[in-house]
Image (tube, rainbow, N blue to C red):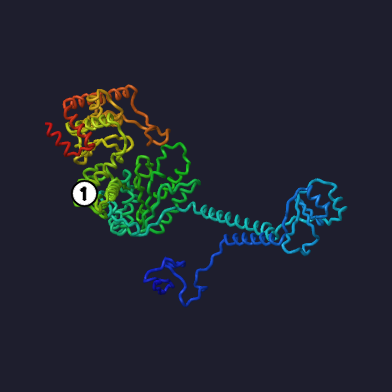
Amino acid sequence: MPEEQKHDDDGCIEANGKNNKKQPWKKDNKDCGPKSNEPFFSFNRPQFRFSIWFFIISIILIMLFNALYVREQQPTEKLIEYSDFKRRIIDDEIKVVHIEEEFLYGQPYYTSDEPTTQGEQRIIYKTVPVDDPGFIELLDSKGVTYYAVPQRDSGLLAFILNWIFPFAILFFVWRVLFRRVGNMGSSVMQFGQNKAQIVAEGNTGVTFNDVAGADEEKAELVEVVDFLKNPFKYTEIGGKIPKGVLLVGAPGTGKTLLARAVAGEGHVPFFRMSGSDFVEMFVGVGAARVRDLFRQAREKAPCIIFIDELDAIGKSRIAGISGNDEREQTLNQLLVEMDGFDSTNGVIILAATNRPEVLDPALLRPGRFDRQIVVDKPDLNGREAILKIHCANVKLDESVDIRTVAKTTPGFVGADLANIVNEAALLAVREGRTKVKQEDFSEAIEKAVAGLQKKNKLINQKEREIVAYHETGHALTAAFTEGSDPVQKISIVPRGLVALGYTLQTPSEDRFLLSEEELLSKIDVLLGGRAAEKIIFKSVSTGAANDLTRATDIARKMITEYGMSEKFHNVVLSQKGSPFLGDISQPGQLSREYSESTQQYVDEEVARIIDQRYNRVLDLLKEKQNLLKTISKKLLDLETIEEKEFLNIIQKAE
């Protein structure tokens, strides 16, 4: 039985109250067709759109029809040799000869109207002419009628090739070229226009409630938003709002998120633009876009201008040799526009960068970017608040403790925490669960810190033993060294590109200052893996390469930056870049400001510190050698030892 159909007001055919998607006509994403009382060819139906393909297909069909029709009406042509053609003339089989440039055609009858018997097929003999001076004399002697005819072709085909096809090609080229020239012309005229995206109020979808872990930064920006809403409150007392606010911080700390929150809270036009959008291949375009941006901002005041990645156009001019490049002109124009701003006209500039050291000093002076807000990495409470925001739409198991996750992620920024929540959700789905558990967060954190697990990576037994003793050496050194971070997990499961195992340590609290003893304890833990290999296998491997690099870096900073050496106590042995070498931020272009003898002392002191701490770790692990073997053997069996089990083994041994 066919489904019951009914017509709605828009002419759409519905089946059982639902749109019938099998109908060929569409209207507003509905399946529409003619009504029952409407003729099929109605003026309300969609109009037919002409396509060049219809024209091409029609020409091909006409040519095929013409070729087949002409072939049916013409006699059969038979290609023969020239000698056979002459023989047939001599034997009076050929009475009429058509002479063409490429072929000779001969037929045994005089006209095409000559009657033939039923079933008889007329034949025209065809041959390729040769240079034969006596051929015409032969035709005259045999009384053959001969004449030359022009080259035979199709009239329709000749008309198409000679008239329609050339004009079609010219029309096509004209359309394409003029369209591109028109677009190029319009784009050239728009080069000087800024590429800022104007965000209407509320369209960002972000408010200050969506920003966590940056309470002090929000308080500074709330004042900016309040000035835009209530400027009289500030001008009445004689105060002036800062012209520009520069957000400075590491990548992922939420600088752009704060700017979007300002746009969501400000209820004013918000011009969003990246620093790279100002610079083009044409000279002067960047400066023109800066002028156009500020002109539009003045027209729509009060408003906010947000320039992301300011370092793209605001690099210092001190390090550059050339003084007339496109980027410098853009920066000069930006400086002029910001300096000419009236602090009471309601136009505020927000900018974000993670490289403040390369910015031109003229940008950072009072009167341009008056206020610099450092968006730092969140502390423990900040990480917890950020995790709660990202977990709001995630189904969590009752066992999940957000505070514990925040404690195990020191140094993580907002973007890292958002990625951990997403990875934990994906891991739960991979395991076929409907809720995220605590172990999902733990695995997501380890994946972010150490890399992806490589369980299928083939490692021979000898290397597994080396890795097990190496990681146990790290863990035991950390357990018996005062001031080191507690061990959370030991694993010999390969992760990432080169890590064959890892020892995960998490600080019990956020630390901002480290003493000399704590720095030395970090060096001890890094050298624990190499010392364990030396004790057990009487040799060392390449597995400690990264550990040695980090330990050497800490020891060198203690001498050159922290003033912790005996000879240069409280002295910083700094390095600076030369302005004639280009970008001062490039570490490869730094030159030291101390003598060669001082450099020799630094190298010798670094070697002394590393050797002293290495001997201390060797003595410690030799004393705990039985415990080292016990934990390593258990690690070889389990591949992973958690914090509680590790502490239980140590307590039982003592």
Closer to the camera in the image, 473 or 556: 473
Q: Is residue 560 visible?
A: no
Q: Could you tell me residue 188's position as x and y percent?
A: 52, 52
Relative side of 340 to 78, left or right: left
Relative side of 319 to 139, left or right: left
Q: How many marks?
A: 1
Q: Residue furthest right?
A: 141
Q: Could you tell me residue 469's position as x and y percent?
A: 23, 30
In the image, residue 450 sits, relative to residue 267, either above or below, namely above
Q: Could you tell me residue 229's position as x and y percent?
A: 31, 59
In the image, residue 399 sits, relative to residue 45, either above or below, namely above
Closer to the camera in the image, 141 or 523: 141
Relative side of 267 to 469, left or right: right
Q: Is residue 146 visible?
A: yes
From the image, tell me which residue sits under label 1.
Answer: 402
Three-letter code, disc 1: Ile
Label 1 sits on a secondary structure element that is: helix
Q: Which part of the image, by quadrant, shows the N terminus?
A: bottom left
Which residue: 76% across, 63% down? 116
Closer to the camera in the image, 285 or 539: 539
Q: Could you tell me residue 128's position as x and y percent?
A: 76, 49
Q: Which part of the image, by quadrant, shows the C terminus?
A: top left
Q: Residue furthest bottom?
A: 37
Relative side of 55 to 402, left or right: right
Which residue: 27% across, 55% down? 393
In the image, residue 605 sits, relative to residue 364, either above or below, namely above
Which residue: 19% across, 27% down? 621
| Residues packed near mark 1 inside 10 Å, few (<14), some (14 to 19) or many (20 plus) | some
In the image, residue 353 sits, relative to residue 187, either above or below, namely above
